[in-house]
Image: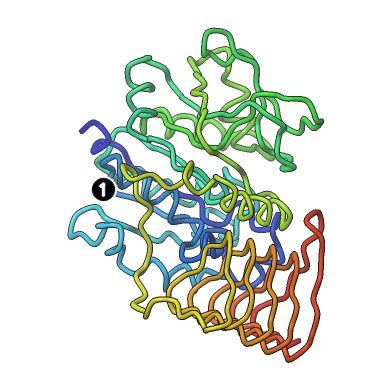
Amino acid sequence: MRASNVLGMIYSSIYDEQVSELTGIRTMGSIPFAGRYRLIDLCLSGMVNCGITKVGVSTKSNYRSLMDHLGSGKAWDLSRKRGGLTLLPPFNVGDSSGIFSHRLEALKGMMDYISHSDKDYILFCDCNVVCNIDYEKFIEAHLNSGADITIAYKRGVKPAIADIMTFDLENDKIVSARTGELGTQAMNYSLNIIIMSRALLERLVNSAATLPDARFESAIIANNVQSLDIRGYKIEEFAEMVDSLQSYYDISMRLLSGGRKELFKKDRPIYTKVRDDVPAIYGVCSKASDSLIADGCVIKGTVENCILFRGVYVAEDAVVKNSVIMQDSYISAGAKINCAILDKNVVIRPNREISGAESYPVYIGKNITV
């Protein structure tokens, strides 16, 4: 498999500030998703499924929960003597503190790890991209085209992230690239899934080091559109970006209306850290419909159109609708919750009512009692 010659590189925290409510205590990569997963599971599983056996994960801060989740990489078959999974904390480069502010600074801190790799190609991915694409086809398309760089993209309304590249293409070749473009019109925008050779990456990063305030998007991509063969690879499958708390909620709710079948595929399974737990328990008077309910939950009240993570307890006469309830939260008797996101270990006292809207979900932080 040609992917065995590819080093996977995952940015776990590059857009933490976009979802500050959820990343105050964790990285983007360790945000809980879909009842039992973390966001990093999606790109990490995609890499493993295509045959990549060596993966580096870039971190910045608040990555203790990410370390606990990833462990040695055993859940993804990456616990190996050679290759496997490597966590890459911030690393001092020159006079910097090591705490990077953008993608290129993070990359400079990882170049020693990349340069010592025995892989000829590098595949980059961000944790805020919710997708389950066939990376093997993506890698094959890059190698067969002879391109210098290939970027996976989607056509649609650009996410609200300033440094996401948009570009124009002619016969799959990118002829212009830019950042900062906004609007409500459909355009081609990067999913930040990028592949290139290790030798080319080293040369481009060394060249960018001489530029003042250089960014990956401008110094590596936009400035080289004319001199390099940079191709686009269009993604037609389920692919969304988490760029706000609202988008996290919208993507989660989309799983309940058909998105789950688009994202979770039998031939490309999503792996995660295993937590052994009993099956969900439903009380005699409980009602549950159109929901994802994980193992370990106890449902005695009503649950409609919700995602419930492991260990959630919904007491008698409690009503939970259109909400995301994270691990080990407790909903007391008579409580009513609608259009809300409850972080881990939240306790809702008896007869309390929390109600947001589909366009403005209420968020309750970890370990808070209401």
Point out the residue furthest to the front here. 284
The residue at 64%/33% (across/down) is: 211
Q: Residues within 10 Å of mark 1 (few under 14, many from 20)?
A: many
Point out the residue furthest to the top here. 171
The residue at 37%/67% (across/down) is: 273
The residue at 40%/61% (across/down) is: 87
Q: Is residue 196 above or below residue 131?
A: above
**Which of the 4 image quadrants contains residue 320?**
bottom right
Of 17 and 204, nearer the camera is: 17
Total marks placed: 1
**Which of the 4 image quadrants contains residue 103?**
top right
Q: Is residue 123 left or right of residue 353?
A: left
Of 262 and 13, nearer the camera is: 262
Picture coordinates of residue 15, whole percent (x, y): 64, 52
**Secondary element type, mark 1:** loop
Residue of label 1:
53
Q: Is residue 258 left or right of residue 211?
A: left
Q: Amino acid at mark 1?
A: Thr
Q: Tell me the colour scheme of the image.
A: rainbow
Picture coordinates of residue 47, whole percent (x, y): 35, 44
Picture coordinates of residue 223, whole percent (x, y): 62, 22
Q: Is residue 114 left or right of residue 258?
A: left
Quarter occupied by the C terminus: bottom right
Quarter occupied by the N terminus: top left
The residue at 65%/55% (across/down) is: 248
Of 22 and 351, nearer the camera is: 351
Picture coordinates of residue 203, whole percent (x, y): 44, 30
Q: Is residue 119 above or below residue 138?
A: below
